[in-house]
Image (cartoon, grey):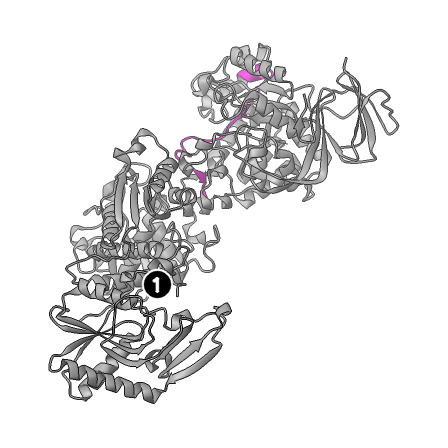
């Protein structure tokens, strides 16, 4: 749901080819590495991790768990639904809203790390930045994504990237997490142009 | 002297072998399988059903006053195209037809146009105000020779006034046609009082508002020995009251409209005021009872309550819309669909309920006559196997408020003849 | 969903989607200083009111403004309407000026249905005659859901002038869709015809029609999970429908003593404006069981949700069926 590259846009024709890019073990290793990177860049300041629904939310929790395990300052985890801030609402069927749960102390003067599964056009992140501004004035906002697949449409760059995956626009990245999909993996799906 | 006219191969009342019918000087001159119309204009009937010209006891022609919605000319054309040779034009015009002057105007306009006999109905009360009798006698002795009186649209609800009207009209050889609606029970009413209206939030029009007036008027007619006609019977309860009254030889007759035979209040869900009519469309049980009553003769005849309305009076919210529907060009087809096709009436029965009985009730002596030698040649030829699709804009009326829009109906009027003159042929007015 | 005209026949998943959206909106606005979402920027909402109304109009206006829609209010008194312009022409004029959505309050039942057939804009019925007031029913359902959770199998007792009440009609249809049972308590003169047997009229609902009717309020209260008091319109108070306001209050008013007959968890709703001392005792309206201010608060979120589902996405989508 978080971006057009997510699971939602699977065509009726079904994928022609599906290739596993990352296994469950690799996903775990990458999440751990990202947690280390976050500690490296932010400690001793505690961060507020805001997961962007759907799969940004479990990822934010996993990153926070690892950070705590590795002895970093305990992050506060929240969720941020950006639907109401999207610039492409009119182009698609009405999207259901997801929960937004922010820390009780708000976002003023804290370090926010936005967490999402895939970075693609950058429009979701832009909407998230608009949403964050409505809730407060963080000291800084950073971005963590599991996969960066390129094709940016806005000047947006992630601070923490699990894996860079060069893709064509016809392909789809599927991030699967046990919390939502019963398994951990990242897959690349390629569709026949005519069938999409 | 017009040229003789031969209708070849027609089936009288849709029965028996085809015969030829020769019309001369406005009368049926010869009738039989071997009638030879040498020198006559010939129309090949090809087995079409021949009926006496239809008679409508209940038409709103809107002239004078609302010539934007219908005129005597356009209404006459619609009637002739619907197979009618006579219509009774209701009195609720502007000015109201409550004086000899107005009824004579309507009568003369009708005669000048010449497509159907237009019999003006006189108002019962002056101005339809329900307070004092109109000059029934003056209207009766006028050139229009009014015999049918009605405040239709409004009920003569004052019991004493209704009693006087019945008695007085009796002395003129006339009949009072009552729009049976107790106004206190229908204040603000918008639809049949039942589940549909309740759910749609439309104020209810209870059948008791009709039935209580019918019961009262039957008793008044009994005591006065006077003739009473009940307009647009809409409820199963009224049918029971009529059955009771007729068994006691009370001089009561009754009409049902085509829309009350076919349509129900289930049509109201979209709030399209084309379905708004007074009395309102009721339930399937009512349509069922009305069809049976018409077949049995408890309800005497079909009358259209043809009520043209301007677009702005229908293309609005339900409660602001005026009640009424077009009916002249669809009546016969609806009767075929609701009565003939289910086997409730044969063509002989159609002639009875759409021509003979209405002519008798309205005292139109030269209408609704048998198809026999020496009788006036008021005839309609019907193709019973044809079907057509109703489109309001294609109807001859100025207004187009038909509830049958887009509906495919059975039966087509092929030719209508008034006193030997062809008034319509193949859907076109002749003249 | 193109229009919101009636709660009759609304699929359960549509209702649930609307209520979920309202809840999400409520939550996302909670405790925020700037209650402004950019979602409906550039969209124009016209409230067209042919009857006076303070709360419904204000609620729609606030809902629209919080989502950054441009909201224009038109009332019958001070406009072309007062000069005799037809509803159709007024609506066509407004949509020609660019209204994306018309919120209509009108004294004629079915007015919103008619409007939806005339204009290209989305139409929201904000009360049509004695027919429907769908957003009121949605805000009532939202309030009940907050207090009671799932409404499946719950009994909601609606008390008073059901006959003339669009609030009652909307709630009956909506609550049944959500699985509730309805009990109506009113004098026979204020009950719509055959209301316990509407299920097979119009065929917009199928199956069960769990509506019962009673004239004994005291007997109805103990088994109620919620009671909904209806406003008694002043024009009904004299003659015809019931003998006197006093007799009505004695028979059908929610008094302190009657509040005690309700189960502990039961909720008291009132669509407002209230006549304290008439249909509801002064103290009852302020009791913790009364959810009257919550209803008003939820009204804004429910109307935001409706605007969101009608105006935010691509046209012709049904809530609950989107991606």
The relative height of residue A177 versus residue B65 in the rendered view (above or below) is below
Q: Which residue is more in the foreground, C264 or A51?
A: A51
Q: Nearer the viewer, residue C232 or C188?
A: C232
Vertical comparison of A129 with C140: above or below: below
**Tag 1 secondary structure:** loop
The residue beneath circle 1 is A95
Give residue C217's quadrant in the image: bottom left
* Range of residues picked out in magenta: B168-194
| Corner quadrant of residue A175 | bottom left
Residue at left offset 19%, top offset 57%: C35
Which quadrant would the N terminus of chain A be assigned to in this image? bottom left
Position of A103 relative to B42 (above/below): below
Asked whether the viewer can see residue B227, the reply is no
Q: Going by the image, does B58 lie left or right of C255?
A: right
Q: Is residue C152 left or right of residue B419?
A: left
> Is A170 included in the stretch rendered in magenta?
no
Q: Main secondary structure of the magenta part?
A: loop
Q: Nearer the viewer, residue C213 or B324?
A: B324
What chain is tagged by disc 1?
A: A
Q: Residue at x 48, y 22 (%)?
A: B66
């Amino acid at each position: 749901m978080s971006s057009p590259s997510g699971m939602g846009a699977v065509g009726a024709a079904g994928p022609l080819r599906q290739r596993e890019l990352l296994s469950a073990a690799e996903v775990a290793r990458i999440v751990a590495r990202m947690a280390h990177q976050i500690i490296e860049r932010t400690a001793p300041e505690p961060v507020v991790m805001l997961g962007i629904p759907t799969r940004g939310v479990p990822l934010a929790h996993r990153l926070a768990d690892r950070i705590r395990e590795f002895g970093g300052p305990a992050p506060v985890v929240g969720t941020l639904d950006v639907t109401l801030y999207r610039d492409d609402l009119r182009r698609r069927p009405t999207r259901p809203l997801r929960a937004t749960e922010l820390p009780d102390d708000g976002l003023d003067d804290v370090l926010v790390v936005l967490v999402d599964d895939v970075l693609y056009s950058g429009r979701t992140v832009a909407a998230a930045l608009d949403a964050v501004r409505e809730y407060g004035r963080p000291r800084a906002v950073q971005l963590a994504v599991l996969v960066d697949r390129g094709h940016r449409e806005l000047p947006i760059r992630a601070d923490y990237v699990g894996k860079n995956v060069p893709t064509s626009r016809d392909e789809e990245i599927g991030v699967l997490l046990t919390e939502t999909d019963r398994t951990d993996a990242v897959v690349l799906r390629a569709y026949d142009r005519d069938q999409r | 002297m017009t040229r003789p006219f031969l209708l070849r191969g027609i089936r009288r009342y849709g029965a028996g072998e085809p015969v030829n019918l020769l019309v001369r000087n406005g009368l049926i001159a010869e009738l039989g399988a071997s009638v030879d119309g040498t020198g006559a204009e010939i129309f090949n009937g090809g087995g079409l059903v021949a009926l006496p010209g239809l008679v409508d006891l209940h038409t709103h022609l809107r002239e004078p006053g609302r010539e934007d919605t219908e005129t005597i000319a356009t209404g006459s054309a619609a009637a002739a195209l619907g197979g009618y040779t006579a219509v009774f034009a209701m009195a609720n015009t502007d000015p109201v037809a409550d004086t000899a002057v107005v009824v004579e105007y309507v009568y003369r306009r009708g005669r000048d146009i010449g497509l159907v006999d237009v019999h003006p109905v006189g108002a019962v009360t002056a101005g339809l105000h329900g307070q004092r009798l109109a000059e029934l006698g003056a209207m009766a002795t006028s050139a229009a020779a009014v015999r049918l009186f009605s405040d239709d649209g409004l009920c003569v609800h004052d019991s004493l006034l209704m009693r006087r009207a019945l008695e007085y009209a009796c002395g003129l050889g006339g009949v009072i046609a009552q729009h049976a609606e107790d106004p206190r029970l229908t204040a603000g009413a918008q639809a049949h009082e039942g589940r549909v209206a309740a759910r749609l939030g439309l104020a209810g029009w209870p059948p008791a508002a009709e039935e209580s007036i019918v019961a009262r008027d039957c008793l008044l007619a009994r005591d006065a020995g006077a003739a009473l006609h009940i307009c647009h019977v809409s409820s199963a309860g009224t049918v029971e009251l009529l059955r009771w009254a007729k068994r006691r030889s009370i001089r009561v007759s009754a009409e049902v409209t085509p829309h009350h035979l076919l349509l129900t209040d289930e049509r109201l869900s979209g709030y399209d005021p084309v379905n708004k009519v007074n009395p309102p469309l009721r339930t399937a049980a009512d349509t069922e009872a009305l069809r049976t009553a018409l077949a049995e003769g408890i309800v005497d005849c079909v009358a259209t309550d043809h009520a043209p309305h301007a677009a702005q009076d229908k293309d609005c919210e339900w409660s602001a819309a005026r009640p009424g529907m077009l009916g002249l060009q669809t009546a016969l087809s609806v009767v075929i669909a609701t009565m003939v096709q289910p086997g409730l009436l044969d063509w002989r029965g159609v002639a009875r309920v759409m021509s003979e009985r209405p002519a008798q009730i309205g005292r139109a002596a030269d209408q609704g006559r048998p198809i026999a030698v020496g009788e006036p040649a008021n005839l309609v030829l019907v193709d019973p196997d044809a079907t057509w699709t109703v489109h309001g804009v294609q109807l001859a009326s100025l207004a187009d408020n038909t509830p049958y829009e887009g509906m495919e109906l059975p039966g087509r009027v092929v030719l209508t003849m008034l006193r030997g003159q062809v008034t319509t042929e193949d859907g076109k007015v002749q003249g | 969903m193109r229009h919101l005209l009636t709660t009759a026949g609304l699929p359960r998943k549509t209702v649930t989607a609307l209520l979920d959206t309202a809840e999400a909106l409520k939550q996302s606005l909670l405790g925020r200083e700037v209650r402004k979402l950019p979602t409906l920027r550039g969209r124009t909402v016209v409230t067209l009111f042919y009857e006076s109304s303070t709360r419904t109009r204000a609620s729609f206006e606030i809902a629209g403004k919080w989502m950054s829609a441009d909201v224009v209010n038109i009332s019958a008194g001070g406009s072309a309407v007062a000069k005799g312009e037809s509803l159709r022409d007024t609506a066509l004029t407004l949509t020609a000026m660019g209204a994306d959505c018309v919120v209509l309050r009108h004294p004629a039942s079915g007015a919103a249905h008619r409007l939806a057939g005339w204009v290209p804009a989305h139409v929201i019925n904000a009360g049509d005659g004695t027919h429907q007031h769908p957003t009121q029913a949605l805000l009532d359902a939202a309030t009940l859901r907050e207090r009671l959770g799932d409404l499946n199998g719950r009994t909601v007792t609606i008390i008073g002038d059901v006959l003339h009440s669009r609030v009652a009609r909307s709630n009956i249809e909506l609550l049944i869709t959500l699985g509730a049972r309805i009990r109506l308590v009113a004098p026979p003169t204020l009950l719509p015809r055959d209301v316990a047997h509407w299920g097979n009229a119009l065929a917009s609902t199928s199956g069960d029609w769990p509506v019962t009717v009673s004239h004994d309020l005291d007997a109805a209260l103990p088994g109620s999970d919620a009671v909904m008091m209806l406003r008694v319109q002043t024009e009904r108070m004299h003659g015809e429908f019931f003998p006197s306001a006093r007799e009505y209050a004695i028979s059908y008013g929610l008094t302190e003593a009657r509040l005690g007959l309700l189960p502990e968890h039961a909720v008291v709703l009132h669509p407002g404006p209230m006549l304290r001392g008439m249909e509801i005792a002064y103290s009852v309206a302020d009791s913790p069981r009364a959810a009257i201010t919550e209803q008003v608060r939820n009204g804004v979120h429910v109307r935001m949700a409706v605007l969101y589902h009608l105006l935010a996405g691509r046209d012709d989508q049904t809530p609950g069926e989107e991606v």
